[in-house]
Image (tube, rainbow, N blue to C red):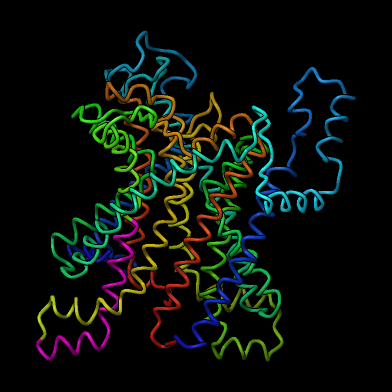
């Protein structure tokens, strides 16, 4: 939003100016990514080990984030949770954006009945509320990591398609596309070399926003007990497991909540603070 | 209203009808075509193959899928939603009272959040760039960025654990007086209001700001109109369409919101019913609940589009 751009001092790097808020947000995202990659090597205890005699233990030396409802080390569980939350969401958003954007560009370039059918069908898919879709699929096939990734991807393909198609339709009317068509270039060349380079920046910003939606939906499903199944636990599942610690304000329930919030708010702030040139649809 | 608008609206309603059919189809197939044989699930692990085959026959499970879909649709048209697997009761009877509860929750939330969000959104746009605007914007980004269950958890922590004003769980049947009623609805409604309002504030603010940057508002500024006159007389009437559009779109977030909120607060609504049905794999119940949610959602987003078409002065 405008407020952060107006308020924060500007940094210059690679020809763009960045606001401080954006830089901090990027650092938080980078930190969580590193945690997700390195988690198995840095966790102090195995995620299944019961290391505390007390449940919902407070923060103390050795158990830096306290213990959970079974007395397991919370720090290890949150670090490993990052792996599942970030990993599953990233895989899902990559599939969703790749399929959505490719289909969107093909629809825009081809036009005609293909465009109409795809748009109509994906718009209809968009009319199914996302949580409901997740619930129904989990009810039908049960919950596992591949099912979760595919379900989340399918839910967000229509949105990515709509966004990319709207951008591509604008580019499609440009002269250089007409020239390329007259040259007799194939559809693959048109979308890969003529359309994509012109829409890639807003598409990447959209990728980030969709990542946030997916993290939120995954956490919501896990919180309902329909996401990752024990003993594995992503952040949403960690909140669910330890919700009994809420009356004592146990770190076991607060830390995973903060983890989710820090990740999603950072992505949102980073995108809001991207230089105008990158963020704008008609860049 | 000219025939042009009427045509567009009718076309949009036609699209909604086609969409509804596709959605019904998707719901039906997601629940009945995917792996997991209904008959063997119902009879449990000890069932003999003959018993399973018999039940499959009785439930028309051997018929082609498209035929079963049509049978199901026909049943829907007669108001027959099927029979619950889990407790052998007609689905319609299970849903009835629950639906009323959910509608009450959604209704109260709407009544609270719409005026609140519009006031905050419009004033934030009027005072764009001020400290007030920045606070409202940051708070709404914050609420949008966190999952609904976190808003609910924080509300419980604040109002039930620290302040001890409200009970953490609600049970609608125990309501005897107005105070009881307020105490029961307060927590779910507060949570939902936060979630819905944040969306609405952002969209309303964006709509008003967009109108404020149009040439005729600049003209009003140049001729010396006051700031409030500029917003209330010049910008707002033109931003009304986008704002109503934003309200309808935000209300569609209620559909996702109630699923989480009813589960957390143990509110006996239709979303809780559905989450429980998922746990027991009660497919007819899931299908019907899913259908009701899709209907509501489709109704709201269609309404948003129709309002957007009708409020476009170029079509009038």
Q: Is A283 situated left or right of B275 in this image?
A: left
Tell me: residue A15, above or below residue B256.
Answer: below
User: Splitting the image into 4 quarters, where does residue B15 fall?
Assistant: bottom right
Percent position of residue B116, x then y: 24, 56
Which residue is at the front of the view, A103 or A246? Answer: A246
Q: Is residue A273 visible?
A: yes
Q: Residue at x 12, y 91 (%)?
A: B223
- The C terminus of chain B lies in which quarter of the figure? bottom left
Drawn side of residue B233 relative to residue A115, left or right: left
The residue located at (34%, 10%) in the rendering is A54
Q: How many marks?
A: 0
Q: Residue at x 33, y 46 (%)?
A: A28
Of residue A162 and residue B203, the one placed in the foreground of this image is: B203
Q: Is B209 contained in the magenta span?
A: yes
**In the image, residue B149 lies at what x, y percent?**
38, 38
Nearer to me, B65 or B106: B106
Q: Quadrant of the N terminus of chain B?
A: bottom left
Q: Is residue A165 left or right of residue A11?
A: right
Q: Residue at x 66, y 68 (%)?
A: A118
Question: In the image, is residue B89 part of the stretch drawn in magenta?
Answer: no
Residue B82 in the image: state x and y as whole percent. Answer: 69, 40
Can residue A227 be seen at all in this image of the molecule?
A: no
Q: Nearer the viewer, residue B250 or B146?
A: B250
Q: Of helix, strand and loop, which mostly describes the magenta segment? A: helix
Q: Position of residue B177 (x, y in %)?
A: 27, 32
* Residue positioned most to the right: B50
What range is drawn magenta here? B199-224
């Amino acid at each position: 939003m405008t407020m952060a751009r107006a308020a924060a001092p500007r940094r210059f790097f690679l020809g763009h100016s960045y606001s401080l808020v954006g830089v901090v947000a990027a650092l938080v995202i980078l930190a969580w990514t590193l945690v997700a990659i390195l988690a198995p090597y840095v966790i102090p205890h195995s995620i299944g080990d019961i290391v505390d005699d007390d449940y919902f233990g407070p923060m103390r030396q050795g158990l830096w984030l306290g213990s959970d409802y079974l007395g397991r080390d919370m720090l290890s569980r949150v670090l490993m949770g990052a792996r599942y939350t970030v990993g599953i969401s990233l895989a899902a958003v990559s599939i969703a954006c790749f399929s959505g954007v490719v289909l969107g560009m093909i629809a825009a370039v081809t036009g005609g009945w293909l465009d109409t059918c795809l748009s109509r069908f994906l718009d209809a898919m968009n009319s199914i509320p996302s949580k409901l879709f997740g619930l129904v699929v989990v009810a039908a096939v049960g919950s596992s990591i591949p099912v979760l990734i595919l379900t989340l991807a399918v839910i967000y393909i229509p949105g990515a398609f709509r966004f990319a198609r709207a951008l591509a339709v604008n580019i499609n009317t440009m002269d250089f596309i007409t020239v390329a068509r007259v040259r007799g270039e194939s559809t693959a060349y048109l979308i890969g070399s003529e359309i994509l380079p012109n829409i890639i920046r807003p598409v990447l910003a959209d990728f980030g926003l969709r990542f946030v939606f997916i993290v939120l939906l995954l956490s919501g499903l896990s919180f309902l007990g329909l996401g990752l199944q024990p003993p594995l636990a992503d952040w949403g599942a960690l909140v669910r497991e330890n919700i009994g610690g809420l009356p004592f304000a146990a770190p076991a329930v607060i830390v995973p909540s903060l983890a989710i919030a820090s990740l999603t708010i950072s992505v949102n702030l980073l995108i809001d603070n991207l230089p105008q040139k990158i963020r704008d649809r008609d860049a | 209203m000219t025939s042009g608008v009427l045509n567009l609206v009718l076309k949009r309603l036609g699209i909604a009808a086609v969409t509804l059919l596709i959605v019904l189809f998707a719901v039906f197939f997601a629940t009945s075509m995917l792996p997991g044989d209904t008959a063997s699930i119902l009879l449990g692990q000890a069932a003999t193959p003959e018993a399973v085959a018999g039940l499959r026959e009785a439930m028309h499970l051997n018929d082609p899928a498209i035929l079963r879909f049509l049978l199901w649709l026909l049943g829907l048209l007669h108001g027959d939603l099927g029979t619950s697997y889990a407790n052998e009761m007609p689905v319609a009877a299970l849903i009835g009272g629950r639906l009323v509860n959910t509608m009450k929750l959604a209704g109260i939330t709407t009544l609270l959040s719409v005026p609140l969000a519009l006031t905050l959104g419009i004033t934030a746009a009027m005072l764009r760039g001020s400290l007030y605007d920045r606070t409202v914007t940051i708070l709404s980004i914050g609420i949008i960025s966190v999952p609904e269950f976190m808003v609910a958890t924080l509300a419980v922590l604040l109002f039930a654990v620290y302040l001890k004003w409200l009970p953490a769980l609600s049970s609608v049947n125990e309501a005897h007086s107005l105070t009881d009623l307020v105490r029961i609805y307060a927590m779910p409604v507060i949570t939902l209001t936060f979630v819905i309002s944040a969306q609405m504030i952002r969209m309303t603010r964006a709509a008003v700001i967009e109108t404020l940057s149009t040439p005729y508002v600049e003209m009003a500024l140049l001729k010396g109109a006051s700031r409030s006159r500029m917003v209330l007389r010049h910008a707002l009437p033109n931003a009304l369409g986008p704002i109503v559009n934003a309200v309808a779109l935000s209300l569609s977030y209620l559909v996702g919101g109630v699923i989480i909120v009813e589960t957390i607060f143990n509110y006996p609504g239709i979303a809780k019913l559905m989450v429980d049905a998922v746990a027991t794999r009660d497919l007819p119940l899931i299908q019907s609940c899913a259908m009701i949610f899709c209907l509501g959602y489709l109704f709201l987003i269609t309404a948003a589009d129709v309002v957007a078409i009708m409020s476009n002065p170029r079509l009038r």
